[in-house]
Every structure is written in C-alpha cells, then in structure tokens.
Amino acid sequence: MTVRLRPALAAAAILAVPALSGCAAETPDYQSVWSTASTTSAAPTSTDPDAPPMSIATFLEQSGVTGQPVAPDKLTDLTVSMQTPPGWHPYQNSNLAPGTRVIAKGDTYPTAMLMVFELDGDFDVAEALTHANVDAQASENFRELNASTADFNGFPSSMIEGSYDLNGTRMHSYNRIVIATGAPPDRQRYLVQFTVTGFADKAAEDGPDVESVIRGLTVALPR
C-alpha cells in the first residue's frame, strides 16, 4: 500500500539510530528523512528567505510524492546493501519502519542504518537533493566536517558528515541520501538513506570499522 511519506516514517524517526540494550531510546542523531507529520500536498512554492530551511521530506510531500518502505533484500530491480564488519550484529526494534536495517557494534554505538523507500510521483531530483542535509544541519551545535553532492555509483546523491551534541554527548555521524532508479522496464525510483553514527571521542578507535561500513554501501543495478 502506498502511503504518505512522513506519517509512514514517524516511528522510524523515533529510533533511527538508537542506543541499544541497557539504554533508553533517545532522540535520533540524524532524524529520518521524514520525521514529522504533515497533511500538506500542494506543489512547493517560494518561501520567505528568513523561513526555516525545507527538509527533503517536506519538499517531496509538497511535490505530491508518496512513498513506501521496502526491505533492501526484497528489491529485484536494484541492489542495496551494507557491509557488516566482524563484531557487528543486526539490531531489531518494533519501532523501526518495516524493512529498516540496523547493525551495531556491541551494545551501543557505533551503529549503521539503511532504509529504502519506493517513491510514487514525479519531482525534480536535483532540487530535492538541495534539501537532503537540512535535518542533519538542524542537529544541536552541528559542525560540518565534510559534504558532497557528487553522484554515488552513477545515481544522484547528497552526503554530509559532521559532529553534534546529543543529550550532552558529542556524536559523529555520516549521512547519505541517494535517489536511485531501478532497472528497466519499470525504472522505479527509490530513495535510499544510509546513516552511520558513533561517539565523537571514539572516532579514531572506531574509524576502521566505520570506514569499512561506509565503503561497503552498495546501491547499483543488478548484474
């Protein structure tokens, strides 16, 4: 069933990158691409330059786009996967959107989250990606460390990496959004969101594993 974007993902936003066993659920480090409810469906229009930046969720919904979460391993016209390093394990939580994949190292951070959404509706991909980093940049005391608008494996993409405060702890996170088109004949359009999060003061210690997870992201047409 096709659903409206942000309401469908409200639960995923609650625990997008959660602390694991022994810790209560926390506010997501990077909010999921659709994190608040809205019933707006009108086409995007010019706004006051002093107004808050528009998230990609708002842009897509105002463009009339609807979406449905899809498990990466259920796709037949697109290959989407992430690598699981030794010592990492799958994490399951009923509050996550159906199809969300989360892996974690030990009982807490670092974590990696992979989500795929099947999109229905036409929109300007380049314009949508100008809104891709808004939620990340809204994180408390966010400091950008790296960003890119280069394609990812031939698909339009936006990436941002930075540090921010979460409940008094400095965090480090890598976030990438890819707008991918599946194989013919359907050429279905998908949004892929990939987030890796860890403690900033353990960035050097966790670096090799985190880099392995990031390098292991695959978004490609099936061979």
Image (spheres, helix red, strand yellow):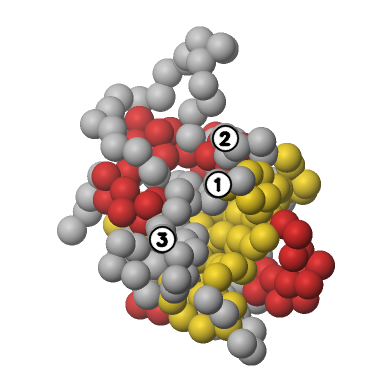
Q: Could you tell me which quadrant the C terminus lies in?
A: bottom right
**Local secondary structure at mark 1:** loop
**Kind of residue indicated by mark 1:** Asn
The structure residue drawn at horizontal position 67% and vertical position 60%, both measured from the top left corner, is 199
The structure residue drawn at horizontal position 40% and vertical position 24%, both measured from the top left corner, is 44
Q: Which mark is residue 206?
A: none
Residue 86, horizontal then vertical, whole percent = 64, 89
The answer to the question of whether label 1 and label 3 lie on touching residues, with beta carbons closer than 8 A, is no
The structure residue drawn at horizontal position 77% and vertical position 48%, both measured from the top left corner, is 146
Q: Could you tell me which quadrant the N terminus lies in?
A: bottom left
Separation of marks 1 and 3 at Cα, in angstroms? 12 Å
- The foreground one among 180 and 33 is 33
Q: How crowded is mark 2: few (under 14 residues within 10 Å), some or many (20 or more)?
A: some
218 lies above or below 38? below
The quadrant where residue 40 appears? top left
Q: Nearer the viewer, mark 2 or mark 3?
A: 3
Q: Residue furthest right?
A: 204
Residue 182, horizontal then vertical, whole percent = 45, 65
Q: How crowded is mark 1: few (under 14 residues within 10 Å), some or many (20 or more)?
A: few
User: Left or right: 96 with respect to 158?
Assistant: left
Separation of marks 1 and 2 at Cα, in angstroms? 15 Å
Separation of marks 2 and 3 at Cα, in angstroms? 23 Å
68 lies above or below 184? above
Q: Residue 167 carries which label?
A: 1
Instruction: Give the total of numbered labels.
Output: 3
User: Left or right: 160 with respect to 13?
Assistant: right
- The foreground one among 72 and 96 is 96
Q: Mark 3 points at which residue?
A: 24
Q: Which mark is residue 138?
A: 2
- The foreground one among 25 and 142 is 25
User: Left or right: 110 with respect to 206?
Assistant: left
**Kind of residue indicated by mark 2:** Ala
